[in-house]
């Protein structure tokens, strides 16, 4: 059975993580006290006066009672001052109050609330959004908490593969921990095998075919993906990114940079980097630039920004042929 502190403040600009922690605490509270033992104050109901009333209320219920106040990022120091005396006198064996603040800009939980919760023996936890360039280090650290070994290069592969959302990265790391077990050493091959859907792999194959100038393969894969329900805008986002990388690689090779140096700047698994360098090196820089323009234009059209009278399917096939010419 979990143990509870008398007070919590969960705050930060990672709103998804703050929401996750609220959901988890509420579920634990309802398991402990039942639905009737949990009072939720959110939105316009999350005021200092309402919290005071809830904490002061007399109840004949047995066991621990929970009060959840969600929205204290709108509070001022005066609100914290109203609540602080009641936090100081909390019955730690019978009552838990949890404050949640989804912070942004100047909307932050007041410092007085931080101090009052700490003084009451409570817990203050921050959920901050990690900057993109700090994500690989964050991934390595988070993997360690799950008893997984992962180096920074593998972490960069994971970020490149699943994106920069911390929630998605956390879920993928948890999946890896379940699949490989505590103490496992995770490499780029494990990332590719475990953290991508079959559809995602086919999208990468489409991008590879376009970079290589393989028109039959590109057209066939595109039609296959469309037949299984993948929408064109979603496919093209990854394709355009890959073509942009290919143009940069081709330009670097054309300027005289050795392949080994070019490879160091690529955020992808080594085998994928080798293939991209080889494919981009076999095509003219101008051809790859034209392919990028064609696919970027198709992406705009697929989102309703173009003026073409062609159907989406016809426009896609024509673009595949033009990009591989």
Image: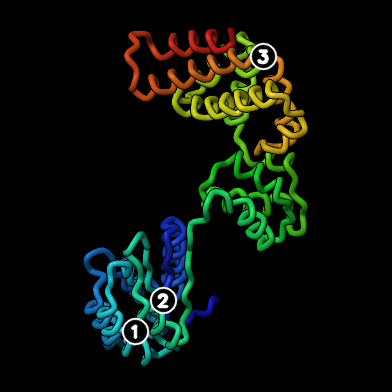
Give the percent coordinates (x, y) of residue 11. Answer: 42, 67
Q: Residue 33 carries which label?
A: 2
Quick one: label 3 or label 1, which is nearer the N terminus?
1
- For label 1, the residue is 61
Q: Distance between the residues labelled 1 and 2?
A: 9 Å
Quick one: label 2 or label 3, which is nearer the N terminus?
2
Q: How far apart are marks 3 and 1 (CA)?
A: 75 Å
Q: In which quarter of the image is residue 200?
A: top right
Residue under the image location 44 percent in, 26 percent down: 233
Of 110 and 30, nearer the camera is 110
Q: Callout 1: helix, strand or loop?
A: loop
Q: Callout 3: helix, strand or loop?
A: loop
Give the percent coordinates (x, y) of residue 217. Answer: 63, 13
Residue under the image location 47 percent in, 59 percent down: 17
Give the percent coordinates (x, y) of residue 193. Answer: 70, 38
Q: Residue 283 carries which label?
A: 3
Q: In this view, does 250 lie above or below 325?
A: below
118 with respect to 50 (left or right): right
Disc 2 or disc 3, which is closer to the eye? 3
Q: Is residue 131 above or below residue 115?
A: above
Q: How far apart are marks 2 and 3 (CA)?
A: 66 Å
Q: Is residue 109 above or below residue 241?
A: below
Q: How crowded is mark 2: few (under 14 residues within 10 Å), some or many (20 or more)?
A: some
Q: In the rendered image, which quarter contains the C terminus?
A: top right
Question: Marks 1 and 2: CB-CB under 8 Å?
Answer: yes
Of 39 and 50, nearer the camera is 50
């Amino acid at each position: 059975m979990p143990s509870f502190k008398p007070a919590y403040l969960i705050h930060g600009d990672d709103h998804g993580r703050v929401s996750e922690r609220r959901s988890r605490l509420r579920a634990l509270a309802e398991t402990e006290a039942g639905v009737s033992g949990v009072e939720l104050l959110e939105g316009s109901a999350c005021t200092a006066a309402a919290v005071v009333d809830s904490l002061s209320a007399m109840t004949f219920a047995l066991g621990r009672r929970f009060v959840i106040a969600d929205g204290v990022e709108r509070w001022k120091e005066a609100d914290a001052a109203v609540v602080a005396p009641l936090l100081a006198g909390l019955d730690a064996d019978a009552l838990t109050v949890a404050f949640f603040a989804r912070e942004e800009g100047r909307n932050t939980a007041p410092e007085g609330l931080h101090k009052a919760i700490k003084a009451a023996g409570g817990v203050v936890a921050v959920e901050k959004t990690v900057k993109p360039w700090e994500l690989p280090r964050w991934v390595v650290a988070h993997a360690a908490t799950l008893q997984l070994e992962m180096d920074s290069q593998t972490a960069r592969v994971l970020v490149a593969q699943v994106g920069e959302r911390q929630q998605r990265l956390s879920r993928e790391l948890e999946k890896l921990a379940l699949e490989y077990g505590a103490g496992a050493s995770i490499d780029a091959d494990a990332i590719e095998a475990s953290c991508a859907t079959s559809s995602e792999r086919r999208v990468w194959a489409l991008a590879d075919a376009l970079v290589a100038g393989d028109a039959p393969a590109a057209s066939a894969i595109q039609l296959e993906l469309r037949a299984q329900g993948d929408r064109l805008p979603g496919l093209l986002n990854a394709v355009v990114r890959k073509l942009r990388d290919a143009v940069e690689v081709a330009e670097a090779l054309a300027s005289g940079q050795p392949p080994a140096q070019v490879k160091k700047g690529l955020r992808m698994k080594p085998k994928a980097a080798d293939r991209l360098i080889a494919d981009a090196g076999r095509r003219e820089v101008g051809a790859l630039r034209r392919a990028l323009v064609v696919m970027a234009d198709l992406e705009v059209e697929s989102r309703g920004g173009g003026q073409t009278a062609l159907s989406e399917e016809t426009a896609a096939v024509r673009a595949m042929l033009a990009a591989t010419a």
